Image (tube, grey):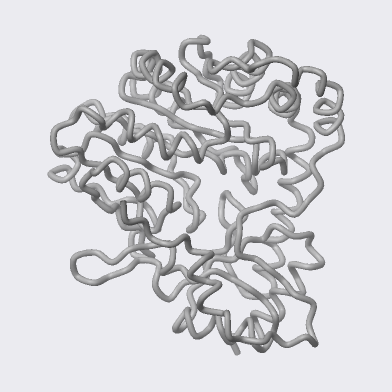
Amino acid sequence: MNFEPYPFEKLNILLKDITPNDKYEPSTLTIGEPQFETPHFIQEALYNSVAQLRKYPKTAGEDELIAAQIEFVSKRFNVNLSDKEIIPTFGTREVLFNFPQFFLFDKKEPTIAFTNPFYQIYEGAAIASKAKTIHLNLTQENAFKPEIDEEKLSSCHLVILNFPNNPTSSTLSLEELSHWVKLALKYDFVLLNDECYSEIYTSTPIPSLLEASIYAGNKTFKNILVINSISKRSSAPGLRSGFIAGDETILREYIKYRTYLGCASPLPLQSAAAAAWRDEKHVQVARDIYKKNFEAAYEILGAQIPEATFYLWLSVPNALEFTKKLYKEYNVKVLPGEYLGRDDKNGFNPGKDFIRIALVEDTKKIKSALERIKECLS
């Protein structure tokens, strides 16, 4: 298998010979990892359940965690799932890598489509599955929403969307998502939406593909799956708690496959995750911080405040050179957008001339970094 280096590895190579200006405090705004303490009630739930380490966890997840995740989906999206329509997972990265391999294993000429630019695990899964890849380009001209080419989609077995989107911060409405549901039914492909940023919204709650499926009349979620995680919403990426939910028929076979993976979450992590999934107050605290960070970006850079995520997708001239200059002269690290995308057949990379800025620090630190970015731009 020939995997591309991860974007952060490419960034390290780009900056390896540069000595940053030590006049400034280092600011790393590259990775989507919240730089806030995990709420104490989650830590306490973990501490109080440590004794459970003496037991093996079930692949299917413990009843406590399943119930908490079903409750989250019900309260947040007004969608009532059965325990056969959801599987707790060890975060979502492992699902995004192994589910395509499971699903595409016996497909003739397997074909997968996903948004471009993208979270690189999608590409890794396609490579591991020996699948043909179709890129759904996200550009400024299409408001960073996936273009629909029905001829190409008709050949797909699996389509992965990612809305709210990393890295562009774009969103899809309930109507737009429901149109994708209808396409999945029309051309009989499985549609999976990566919804890990659904809870980091700035004003109005973002719809789920599960809601859109019901809205489109597909109440059994045929061909429809979503994944979600507490990593962003709870500042707890180390808990590795996520889920995959939707089409019961697909999940029934997928859970059998998962018994061989050995990636069941340890019981103390599941107990702490259950507490996190059930609480909403701490998520609102995080949302308020990210909203203030976006407001600062608007004030300092004139950047439009997106509806969701904590990413700023900023257009800059020559992103690679700008990234190097920003690090050398202002001690700020950002991620060049072209590292998150791939060239199409015409040599066009939709991430080129953009940088991704992760607004994951407190607002005071973010303002300092944004002021330096503004100075570098000028």
Of residue 314 and residue 260, the one placed in the foreground of this image is 260
Q: Is residue 258 above or below residue 124?
A: above
Of residue 158 and residue 52, the one placed in the foreground of this image is 52
Dividing the picture into quadrants, the one containing residue 332 is: bottom right
Q: Residue at x 78, y 50 (%)?
A: 36
Dividing the picture into quadrants, the one containing residue 366 is: bottom right
Whole-percent x and y of residue 188?
21, 27
Of residue 219 and residue 101, the one placed in the foreground of this image is 101
Whole-percent x and y of residue 200?
63, 44
Q: Residue at x 82, y 38 (%)?
A: 39
Dividing the picture into quadrants, the one containing residue 40 is: top right
Q: Is residue 374 above or below residue 228?
A: below
Q: How many numbered marks appear? A: 0
Whole-percent x and y of residue 193?
42, 37
Q: Residue at x 66, y 68 (%)?
A: 297
Q: Residue furthest front?
A: 54
Q: Is residue 257 above or below residue 231?
A: above
In which quadrant is the C terminus drawn?
Answer: bottom right
Whole-percent x and y of residue 142?
34, 59
Answer with left or right where residue 347 lies relative to residue 94.
left
Q: Residue at x 72, y 79 (%)?
A: 371
